[in-house]
Image: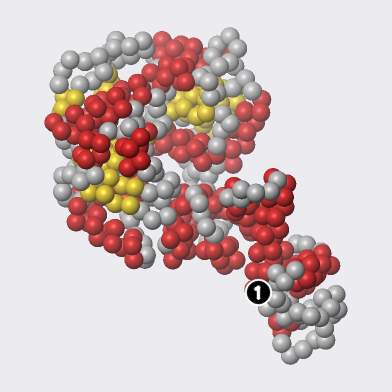
Amino acid sequence: MRTDKQTIWVADDEAATRLFLSDFLASRGYGVLCLDSGEHVVSRLQPSNAPSLLMLDIRMPRLGGLEVMAELETRGLRVPTIVLSGLDQASMVVKAMRLGALDYLVKPLEESNLERAIEKALDDPEAGPGCDVIDVEAGFSSSNKQMSQIRAISDQVAHADVPVLILGESGVGKDVLARYIHQKSGRTGPFVRVNCAALPADLLESELFGHERGSFTGAQRDKPGKFELANGGTILLDEIGEMSPALQAKLLHVLQDGEYSRVGGTRTLSSEARVLAATNKQIDKLVSSGSFREDLLFRLNVITVELPPLRERPEDIVPLCNAFVEKYRSKYKSSVQQLPAELLSAFAAHNWPGNIRQLENNVKRFLILPDLRTALLELHKGKLSSEISQRPNGSLKEQSASAAEGAEKELILRTLNEVNWNRKLAAKRLDICYKSLLNKLHRWEARGQVSSPFAGADLNHKPEQSGNPGLHL
């Protein structure tokens, strides 16, 4: 939740979308007004009551999102806007972005993408889609040996005016490393990030290099590109493996000569921006397949840094959790001072296929809804999905049942070990019937999958209380 009350208007003719966004936004402390048509937006919006952010469905009866934006433009009302679209509406999305929309989100909406887009639009409404301009210091620390080596290399190359190519899986912190290099470089210009995968090719060209008024339908004013904004600073081309070959050629020219021109323009412009690039793709394979220019790769990988996935640096998980709690506790007005030991233990043992971003989202979720049992179940649900996707044989029903039982057994055994195999206490913590717990243990022991202090004994029998407090029932 936010400490400052900001109001967001949602305009969508689908009741389910309005309900979802209303609950999502209200749970994070925003004021919300839901409207079911574009006409209601136009009739209610005045300079004196403009919202902090407008979320518009592109396709609505009578007055759709594009018509609403055009009408607001005619009235001289400029409101930060995010458009919502279906998968088959790419051309309409481009038109909306050219009318001034900051970002677009494809339905069904994903909470992580939704949260990032909203925060980005509210914190920096002029930054534009898929990018953010940052002048604050960035931190980059780790106790992992490989990460320490990466930090040392980054310190050395920060002041060199050469491109750096950052590789790694999604969510490993490529943008964090890029910000760290910028902060250490001493450059006085801003840090500008552009997500090359977030925009169609023609719109991405306009975002990178800018456009002149009248260069295409909807270009009602001159617009500087991100290279222009990043002059004297650093530009991060994130997910550069998604850039079209035609745009790669123009980027190569900028890297070679430092010169470019706006879309529809004739003037030659120059930029002193330092270029960093990042991708989660195997760039060598893209070159081999012909989808990425080899000469551009040569220009970009003067220095190459590959970040390891979180599963290869487990010693960083708990410190990262603590850092996220400290970062977001006040923002969400959470009563949580620190994560429970049981949850930290589960986090430390998790594989984290989504890396640091996934860990961060799980910490945020617990700060908003601090329920330990729900947090553990969500974590194991994610593990189930990962395990099922890796099993090539058997029916979906068999895979689901097997994976579910494996996750259940892991959770039960870990709880039993934590209470020294006090089965009644374990059943209470797990919120399951004591008899059900005994039956599960008996079944797993019969298969040779569990070795307990009671192996060979009747698990339904209550042993005499002994001097070992861990065996008290």
Q: Where does residue 230 sit, x and y in percent of width and height?
A: 23, 35
Pointer 1: residues within 10 angstroms few (<14), some, or many (20+)? some
Which residue shows up at 45% across the image and 52% down it?
Answer: 356
Name the image quarter holding residue 376: bottom right
Amino acid under disc 1: Asn
- In this view, 135 is above or below 323: above
Q: Where does residue 212 sit, x and y in percent of width and height?
A: 25, 15
Placement of the C terminus among the 4 image quadrants: bottom right
- In this view, 279 is above or below 50: below
Q: Decide if residue 43 is on the left or right side of residue 125.
A: right
The residue pinned by badge 1 equals 417
Q: Which residue lies furthest to the right in this view?
A: 461
Q: Decide if residue 362 is on the left or right side of residue 435.
A: left
Q: Where does residue 273 sit, x and y in percent of width and height?
A: 20, 37
Give the colour scheme of this rendering: secondary structure
Which residue shows up at 77% across the image and 89% down it?
Answer: 466
- In this view, 192 is above or below 247: below
The answer to whether residue 281 shows anywhere in this view is yes
Nearest the viewer among 422 and 244 is: 244
The answer to whether residue 378 shows anywhere in this view is no
Q: Decide if residue 330 is on the left or right side of residue 286.
A: right
Q: Decide if residue 256 is on the left or right side of residue 203.
A: left
Which residue shows up at 75% across the image and 69% down it?
Answer: 447
Q: Where does residue 62 sit, x and y in percent of width and height?
A: 58, 9
- In this view, 261 is above or below 307: above
Local SS, label 1: helix
